[in-house]
C-alpha cells in the first residue's frame, strides 16, 4: 500500500499556489508546480492521433471558457514546452476512472460537502490552486495531474463542483475533459442555476459524474452512454464513491462525523488501493464559507484551514 502521508520527496508536489491577474499571468504562476520529472514527461514525442483529438477538443473548451487559452499558453511558455505537447496531456481521452468519495450533508441550514481523492503514486501535480483572475470569477480547487483543470472547484460566489470519470475511453473522443469542468463552471457562474445551465451545456469527453452545491441546495448529474441525467439531492447524507451513489446508514452529526467517514477505508472514504494512495481530502461548509483540507490521506494527515476564494489578486 502507498504511504498515507506525503514523503519528503513528494512534499514539493503539494503546494498552495496563489495566482491573480489575467489568465496568462495565472498560467505563468502555475509553473511553480514545475519539477524535472514533469518536464521529462512533456518531452515525449506527440502522438498525431491524440494531438488531432486534443486540438478539436480544445475548441469546445475555449468556446465555453475562452480565457483558458491564454492560461495554457502561459503555462507552456513558463516551463518551455511545446503547446501541442501540453494539449495532448491535458485532453486525455483515455484517462482512468477516478477513485473518490463525495459526501453531501446538512449541518443546520447549511450544505456541507466532503471529498477525498485518490490517484496513482506517479501523479506528480497535487497543488491547491487559489485563483483570483481579473477576467473571470475567483476559484479554489485541487489540481491533480492535469494543468488547467481541478477535480473540485469552489467559486467565490458560493458554488461547489466536483467531477469523477466513470470509464476510460478505448478510442479518441472529443469534448470537454471531466477535470476541466469544475473550474469552467465555477469561474463563470454567480448562482447554482447558472452553474447547472453551464454544466448542462457541456459536451463531455468522458462518461462522468458531477455534484454541484451551494449553501442551500445540491444536485447530482451524470453523463453516460451518450445520455445525461440530473436530479436535486433531497435525502441526506448523500454519499458517492467513485462517481456512483451508495447507501449510507445513519446521520452525520457535523463535520467531525464526516471526517470520520472520509477516513474509513472499509466504507470507501480513504480511497487506498494496492497501487494508489489517497492524495487529499477536503471539507467545505458552503454556508459558513469554511474550508479544511489535508495534504495526504485523511486517515493520518491533519486538516488545515484555507481561505475562501477571492480577495487575493
Image (tube, rainbow, N blue to C red):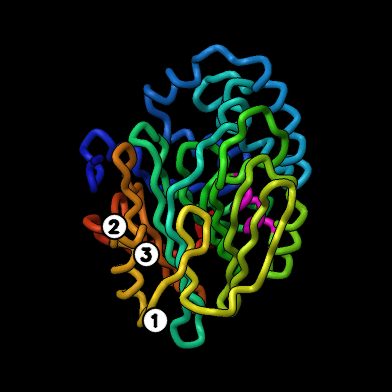
Label 1: which secondary element? loop
Q: Does residue 283 belong to the magenta stretch? A: no
* Real-space Cα separation, disc 3 to disc 1, in angstroms: 21 Å
Residue under label 2, please give it: 265
Residue 144 x/y as whole percent: 45, 42
* Residue occupying image coordinates x 72% and y 22%: 52
Residue 76 x/y as whole percent: 57, 26
Residue under label 3, please give it: 292
Pick the front one: 45 or 188: 45
Q: Which residues are magenta?
A: 180-188
The image quarter containing residue 168 is top right
Picture quarter with the C terminus: bottom right
Q: Is residue 246 left or right of residue 265?
A: right
Q: Are marks 3 and 1 in contact (CB under 8 Å)?
A: no
* Residue occupying image coordinates x 22% and y 42%: 3
| Vertical position of residue 4 compared to residue 58: above or below | below
Q: Give the mark nearest the N terminus, 3 or 1.
A: 1
Amino acid at each position: 500500500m502507498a504511504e498515507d502521508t506525503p514523503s519528503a520527496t513528494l512534499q514539493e508536489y503539494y503546494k498552495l499556489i496563489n495566482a491573480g491577474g489575467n489568465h496568462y499571468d495565472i498560467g505563468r504562476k502555475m509553473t511553480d508546480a514545475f519539477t524535472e520529472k514533469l518536464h521529462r514527461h512533456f518531452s515525449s514525442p506527440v502522438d498525431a492521433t491524440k494531438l488531432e483529438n486534443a486540438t478539436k477538443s480544445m475548441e469546445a473548451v475555449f468556446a465555453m471558457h475562452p480565457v483558458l487559452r491564454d492560461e495554457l499558453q502561459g503555462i507552456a511558455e513558463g516551463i518551455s514546452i511545446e503547446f501541442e505537447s501540453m494539449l495532448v496531456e491535458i485532453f486525455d481521452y483515455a484517462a482512468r476512472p477516478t477513485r473518490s468519495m463525495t459526501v453531501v450533508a446538512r449541518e443546520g441550514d447549511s450544505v456541507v460537502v466532503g471529498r477525498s481523492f485518490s490517484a496513482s503514486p506517479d501523479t506528480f501535480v497535487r497543488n491547491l490552486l487559489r485563483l483570483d483572475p481579473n477576467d473571470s470569477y475567483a476559484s479554489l480547487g485541487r489540481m491533480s495531474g492535469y494543468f488547467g483543470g481541478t477535480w473540485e472547484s469552489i467559486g467565490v460566489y458560493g458554488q461547489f463542483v466536483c467531477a469523477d470519470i466513470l470509464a476510460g475511453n478505448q478510442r479518441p473522443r472529443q469534448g470537454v475533459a471531466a477535470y476541466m469542468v469544475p473550474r469552467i463552471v465555477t469561474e463563470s457562474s454567480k448562482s447554482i442555476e447558472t452553474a447547472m445551465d453551464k454544466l448542462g451545456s457541456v459536451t463531455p469527453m468522458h462518461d462522468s459524474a458531477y455534484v454541484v452545491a451551494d449553501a442551500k441546495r445540491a444536485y447530482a448529474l451524470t453523463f453516460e452512454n451518450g445520455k445525461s441525467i440530473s436530479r436535486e439531492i433531497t435525502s441526506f447524507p448523500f454519499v458517492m464513491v467513485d462517481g456512483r451513489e451508495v447507501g449510507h446508514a445513519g446521520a452525520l452529526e457535523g463535520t467531525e462525523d464526516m471526517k470520520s467517514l472520509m477516513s474509513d477505508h472499509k466504507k470507501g472514504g480513504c480511497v487506498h488501493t494496492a497501487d494508489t494512495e489517497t492524495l487529499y481530502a477536503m471539507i467545505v461548509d458552503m454556508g459558513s464559507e469554511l474550508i479544511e483540507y489535508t495534504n495526504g490521506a485523511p486517515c493520518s494527515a491533519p486538516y488545515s484551514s484555507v481561505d475562501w476564494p477571492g480577495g487575493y489578486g
